[in-house]
Amino acid sequence: MESLMNTANHHLKTIYGYDSFRKGQEQIIQSVLSNNDTLGIMPTGGGKSICYQIPAIMFSGLTIVISPLISLMKDQVDSLEELEVAATYINSSLSANEEKNRYEGMLRGDYQLVYVAPERLEQSQFQSVINQIDISLIAIDEAHCMSQWGHDFRPSYLTIPEWIQQLNSSPVVLALTATATKQVQKDLQSFLNVTDEHTIVTGFARDNLRFQVKKGIDKKAYIYNYVKIEDKILA
């Protein structure tokens, strides 16, 4: 494991340009590289994508990333392509010919990561292609969508556990979210058979954000003075 984590740290530096992992990232990556189904609960901006992207680079097979929004898929793939990581997405924004070409690319082994929406899992053509490929990792982004107690509950997410069981390969599963209450956490652990030992929770708080309530003040004067102070700090 030490050798694998050395490699993970090497990729972190050479591909992403970071000297060290953020809180929780190293634990999650270590769990995934140890072939443990894992749940990661980290704040927005905590670097969840690196938790599956680095294992995807290290694993020999394909990583399937299940993501709920087309815009998120495109942003992620564009960023990975800039880093020269082989990635693509398959969604409804593609023409029939583009979709065909990407399926053929998957069969050739052109990609390390493929992003799809949960609805895609039920399509026969996708299932046919997937069953001809070695899948190393299934990364479930915005995993709170799987729980009816989650604020973005999406019924199609409920098909994921059964779909995973029907795969010809036996991939590691990593579920990630920033918005899991205790009830949502329990649901995700139950749906995906993830133990407490392999559930990494770093909390919801973001160190770079704070909230403060000011009462009985002149709003315009306060904002003016605040902006002046910020300008001096940045100057």
Image (cartoon, grey):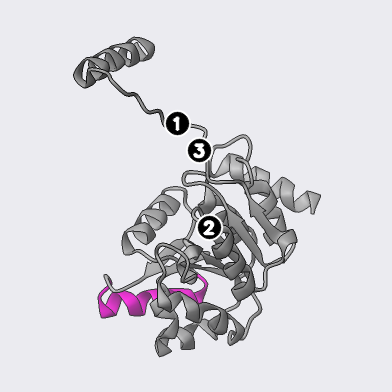
Residue 155 rendering spot, x and y as whole percentages: 41, 77
- Quick one: which residue is furthest to the left in this view? 220
Task: Say which label, 2 or 3, has the lower sequence index.
Answer: 2
Rate crowding at label 2 as few (under 14), some (14 to 19) or many (20 or more) other CA atoms within 10 Å.
many
Q: Amino acid at mark 2?
A: Ala
Expressed as whole percent of the image width and height from the top left, the position of residue 214 reads 34, 24
For the residue marked with disc 1, what is the amino acid?
Arg
* Residue shown at the point (23%, 21%) measured from the top left: 219
Q: Is residue 52 visible?
A: yes
Residue holding disc 2? 180
Q: Nearer the viewer, residue 117 or 200?
A: 200
Work out which quarter of the rendered image holds the N terminus and state it.
Answer: bottom right
Image position of 136 with respect to 73: above or below = below
The mark closer to the camera, 1 or 3, is: 1
- Please provide percent x and percent y for residue 27: 69, 50
Q: Which residue is mark 3?
A: 206
Residue sitting at the far front: 216
Q: Which residues are magenta?
A: 94-109
Q: Secondary structure at mark 3?
A: loop
Query: Which quarter of the picture shows residue 199?
Result: bottom right
Q: Secondary structure at mark 2?
A: loop
Identify the mark nearer the N-term, 2 or 1: 2
Residue at image location 42% in from the left, 90% down from the top: 124
Instruction: From the viewer's side, name the closer residue of 68 and 151.
Output: 151
Amino acid type for the residue under numbered disc 3: Arg
The image's mark for residue 210 is 1
- The reply to whether discs 1 and 3 touch (Cβ–Cβ < 8 Å) is no
Residue located at (54% from left, 86% from top): 131
Magenta stretch prevailing secondary structure: helix
